[in-house]
C-alpha cells in the first residue's frame, strides 16, 4: 500500500462515508487515485452516489408523531439529519421532518418500512423524497433512525427537549403506559416520565431489559475493583451485589429516582399514580433519540 497516506484515507472517508478498511482497499485497488476510489466504492455499494452525500450530517431534528385511538395509542420518533443547524431551522426542512414523523406512525417506527412508505402528497417514497430535497436545499440529509411504541389500552406520551419547532427538537422521548384509567391523567404522568428520560438517559426500562453483556461487563469491573482492595472472595461477592444495585439505580428507568421530586423511584411514582388515574398502571416501555448521538463529526471545513 505504498504511497497511500492516512490523509488520503481520511479524505476518501469524508467524501464517501465508507469505513476505514473499505477506503484503504479502494485506494489500493485504484493505485491511490482518490476520485477513482470513490467510483470503486460506489460500484461496490459502499458509498453514496454524490459527494454531497458523503459529508457528515450530524445536525437536523428529532421529531415525534403520536396517534391516539379510542382505547390505545401509538407513538413514534424519527431522526432526520442535515449538515448544518441552519438547514434544521429552515421551514421547508421542518415540514418535511414533521411529515416523515406522521408517516412513521403507519410504519410503526420500523425504519426500513418507513423508507419505502409513500411520502405525503407525493408519488415517491420517503427515501426518494429526501434524496430529492438534498438537491433542492443543497445539503446532505438522511433519515437516520426511527423508533415506535404501541399500547392497546392506555397512552403513549411524548416530550421534546430543545424544541426548535412544535413536535421537533434535539431530544425526543416517548413513554408507554398501559391502563384503563383516565387518559388525561395518564398523559400528564407519561409526559413527566418522558421529561425524566430525556434528562436521566436510562439504558433500559427494567432490570430484565438490560443487555446481559452490559451487566456482565459491569460485574467484572466491580469484582476487579473489589479484589484490588484485598478482600476475600466471599466478601467480594457481597460488595459486587451492593454496587450492582447502585448501577441499576443509575441505569434502569424504574429504579431511578424521579427527577421531578428527587426522592421517589420512578417505578413507585407509576404505582402511586394509579389512585388518581382510577386504575392500575403498567409501564409499557420507552424510546429516546438524541440528535447526532453516535455520529462521528469532522471539525475540518470542507
Image (cartoon, grey):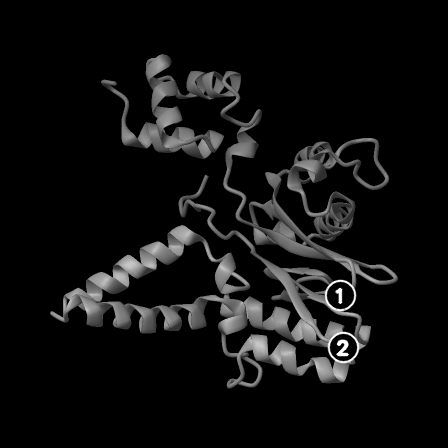
- SS category of the residue bearing label 1: strand
Q: Residue at x 75, y 33 (%)?
A: 125
In the rendered image, which residue does mark 2 sit on?
Answer: 279
Q: Nearer the viewer, residue 26 or 85?
A: 26
Task: Report whether residue 77 is seen.
Answer: no
Q: Residue at x 58, y 79 (%)?
A: 268
* Depicted 164 relative to depicted 76: above or below: below
User: On the picture, is 299 further left or further right than 267?
Assistant: left
Q: CA distance from mark 1 to mark 2?
A: 13 Å
- Image quarter (top left, top right, bottom left or bottom right) of the N terminus: top left
User: On the picture, is 240 further left or further right than 167?
Assistant: left
Q: Earlier in the sequence, mark 1 or mark 2?
A: 1
Q: Position of residue 65 (x, y in %)?
A: 74, 56
Q: Position of residue 2 (x, y in %)?
A: 23, 18
Q: Nearer the viewer, residue 222 or 202?
A: 222
Q: Quadrant of residue 29?
A: top left
Q: Position of residue 34 (x, y in %)?
A: 40, 21
In the rendered image, which residue does mark 1 sit on?
Answer: 155
Amino acid at each position: 500500500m505504498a504511497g497511500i497516506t492516512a490523509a488520503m484515507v481520511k479524505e476518501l472517508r469524508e467524501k464517501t462515508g465508507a469505513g476505514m478498511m473499505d477506503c484503504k482497499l479502494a485506494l489500493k485497488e485504484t493505485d491511490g487515485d482518490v476520485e477513482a476510489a470513490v467510483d470503486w466504492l460506489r460500484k461496490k455499494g459502499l458509498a453514496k452516489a454524490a459527494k454531497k452525500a458523503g459529508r457528515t450530517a450530524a445536525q437536523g431534528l428529532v421529531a415525534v408523531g403520536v396517534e391516539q385511538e379510542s382505547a390505545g395509542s401509538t407513538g413514534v420518533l424519527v431522526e432526520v439529519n442535515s449538515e448544518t443547524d441552519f438547514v434544521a431551522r429552515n421551514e421547508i426542512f421542518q415540514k418535511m421532518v414533521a411529515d416523515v414523523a406522521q408517516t412513521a406512525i403507519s410504519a410503526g417506527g420500523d425504519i426500513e418500512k418507513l423508507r419505502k412508505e409513500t411520502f405525503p402528497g407525493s408519488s415517491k417514497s420517503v427515501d426518494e423524497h429526501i434524496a430529492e430535497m438534498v438537491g433542492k436545499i443543497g445539503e446532505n440529509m438522511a433519515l437516520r433512525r426511527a423508533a415506535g411504541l404501541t399500547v392497546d389500552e392506555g397512552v403513549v406520551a411524548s416530550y421534546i427537549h430543545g424544541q426548535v419547532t412544535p413536535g421537533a427538537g434535539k431530544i425526543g422521548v416517548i413513554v408507554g403506559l398501559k391502563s384503563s384509567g383516565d387518559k388525561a391523567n395518564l398523559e400528564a404522568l407519561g409526559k413527566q416520565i418522558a421529561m425524566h428520560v430525556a434528562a436521566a438517559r436510562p439504558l433500559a426500562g427494567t432490570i430484565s431489559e438490560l443487555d446481559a453483556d452490559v451487566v456482565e461487563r459491569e460485574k467484572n469491573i466491580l469484582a476487579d475493583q473489589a479484589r484490588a482492595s484485598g478482600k476475600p472472595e466471599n466478601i467480594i461477592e457481597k460488595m459486587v451485589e451492593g454496587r450492582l444495585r447502585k448501577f441499576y439505580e443509575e441505569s434502569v428507568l424504574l429504579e431511578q429516582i424521579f427527577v421531578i421530586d428527587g426522592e421517589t423511584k420512578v417505578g413507585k411514582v407509576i404505582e402511586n399514580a394509579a389512585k388518581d388515574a382510577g386504575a392500575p398502571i403498567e409501564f409499557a416501555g420507552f424510546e429516546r433519540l438524541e440528535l447526532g448521538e453516535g455520529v462521528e463529526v469532522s471539525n475540518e471545513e470542507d
